Image: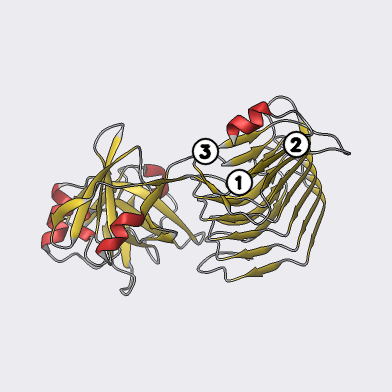
């Protein structure tokens, strides 16, 4: 697709035939009001722009477990499009552990109940590796995921690699789980990953079925898969239609510094960030799309004159639909948002702390 975009002139229509395209596409050719630049799937054909990387080379590790080596970092593991749960303790059917005696200066806290001496706890203490602590911060009602650098079961003490996260912890209703350690891979579907060096990561996985090993993949492209806009020169009069965009480590379809853009009849799913996001844009239309199982579904920020209509937004893990102003955190950072019409969308099944 990238080669087609390079060959195209502003106002051309780029039609993509069915297939899976593992690339990031920058659409930066402006059209005109009468003749917009169009990037579309061939009618009736399934065109997938994917940030997923298939992984292979699995070998037996020990009973029920397999391992392989992957180029680059690994932050999640999928079988097909089904996310697999990272290893954790306590498990999903057990209550989280409470913590107390937080020492922000040292980056330490204690398990308030005390920890029993168990072999797998000793394994983590001896080799924390890539283990992490998943924290629920009651004062503020949010989660944090931080690296575990030291663990002493005898004193029930943890030390984390990001000390600033300790500050808001009050030690009354705050809770934690230990995640991403091979000693915690104790049921089908679970996995753990640890960097071998700057280039490679070892992944250990307990598949529910050995055939699952043939369909494993990870999200590794930490960039938008389809980006409309240019950092320097505004892009205008563009249409994206009929694409399936999945597996980005960031955003599926991103509009930035552009105007008069339409995204329609596309599907954005299983992207770590937003399915479809517009920021610092004007006169945009996001219509008749499906955005599901992303971090957030559809986001419109620092934008003037936008319409979001007739989309289905579902099962995203953070937010469904976001309409917000200056999200830069600086008083003079970005424009506010004005004149956004939201109508006739079907927004459903957002779970946990997700906001429809």
The residue pinned by badge 3 equals: 23
Q: Secondary structure at mark 1?
A: loop
- Density class for disc 3 (Cα within 10 Å; few <14, some 14-19, many ≥20) is some
**Mark positioned earlier in the residue sequence (1 or 2):** 1
Report whether 219 appears left or right of 18: left
- Could you tell me residue 14's position as x and y percent? 69, 39
Q: Residue at x 39, y 63 (%)?
A: 174
The residue pinned by badge 2 equals: 258
- Could you tell me residue 245's position as x and y percent? 57, 50
- Label disc, if present, on residue 17 of the rendered structure: 1
Q: Is residue 294 above or below residue 36?
A: below
Report whether 208 appears left or right of 236: left
- Could you tell me residue 72's position as x and y percent? 35, 37
Q: Secondary structure at mark 2?
A: strand
- Density class for disc 2 (Cα within 10 Å; few <14, some 14-19, many ≥20) is many
Q: Residue at x 28, y 48 (%)?
A: 193
Q: Residue at x 64, y 27 (%)?
A: 6
**Mark positioned earlier in the residue sequence (2 or 3):** 3
Q: CA distance from mark 2 to mark 3?
A: 21 Å
Report whether 18 appears left or right of 126: right
- Mark 1 or 2, closer to the camera: 1
Q: Is residue 305 among the parts visible in the rendering?
A: yes
Q: CA distance from mark 3 to mark 1?
A: 15 Å
- Mark 2 or 3, closer to the camera: 3
Which residue of the protein is positioned furthest toward the top in this rendering? 232
- Could you tell me residue 260's position as x and y percent? 81, 41
- Mark 3 or 1, closer to the camera: 1
- Marks 1 and 2: CB-CB under 8 Å? no
Q: Residue at x 55, y 59 (%)?
A: 318
């Amino acid at each position: 697709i990238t080669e087609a975009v390079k060959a195209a002139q502003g106002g051309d229509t780029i039609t993509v035939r069915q297939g899976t395209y593992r690339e990031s596409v920058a659409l930066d050719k402006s059209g005109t009001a009468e003749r917009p630049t169009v990037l579309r799937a061939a009618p009736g054909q399934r065109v997938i722009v994917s940030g997923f990387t298939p992984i292979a080379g699995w070998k037996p590790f020990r009973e029920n477990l397999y391992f392989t080596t992957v180029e680059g970092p690994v932050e999640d593991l999928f079988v097909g499009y089904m996310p697999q749960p990272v290893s954790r303790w306590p498990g999903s059917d057990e209550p989280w552990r409470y913590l107390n005696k937080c020492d922000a200066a040292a980056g330490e806290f204690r398990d308030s109940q005390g920890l029993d001496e168990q072999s797998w706890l000793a394994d983590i203490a001896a080799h924390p590796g890539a283990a992490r602590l998943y924290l629920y911060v009651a004062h503020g009602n949010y989660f944090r995921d931080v690296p575990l650098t030291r663990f002493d079961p005898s004193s029930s003490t943890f030390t984390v690699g990001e000390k600033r996260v300790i500050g808001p912890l009050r030690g009354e209703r705050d809770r934690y789980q230990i995640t991403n350690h091979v000693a915690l891979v104790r049921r089908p579907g679970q996995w753990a990953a640890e960097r071998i060096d700057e280039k490679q990561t070892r992944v250990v996985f307990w598949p529910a079925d050995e055939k699952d090993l043939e369909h494993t993949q990870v999200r590794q492209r930490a960039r938008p898969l389809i980006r409309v806009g240019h950092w320097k020169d505004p892009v205008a009069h563009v249409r994206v239609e009929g694409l399936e965009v999945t597996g980005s480590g960031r955003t599926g379809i991103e509009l930035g510094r552009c105007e008069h853009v339409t995204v329609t009849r596309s599907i954005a799913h299983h992207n770590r960030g937003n399915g479809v996001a517009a920021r610092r844009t004007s006169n945009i239309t996001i219509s008749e799309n499906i955005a599901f199982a992303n971090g957030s579904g559809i986001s419109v920020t620092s934008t003037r004159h936008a319409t979001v209509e007739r989309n289905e937004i579902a099962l995203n893990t953070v937010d469904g639909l976001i309409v917000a102003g200056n999200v830069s955190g600086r008083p003079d950072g970005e424009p506010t948002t004005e004149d956004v019409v939201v109508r006739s969308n079907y927004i459903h099944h957002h779970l946990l702390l997700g906001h429809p």
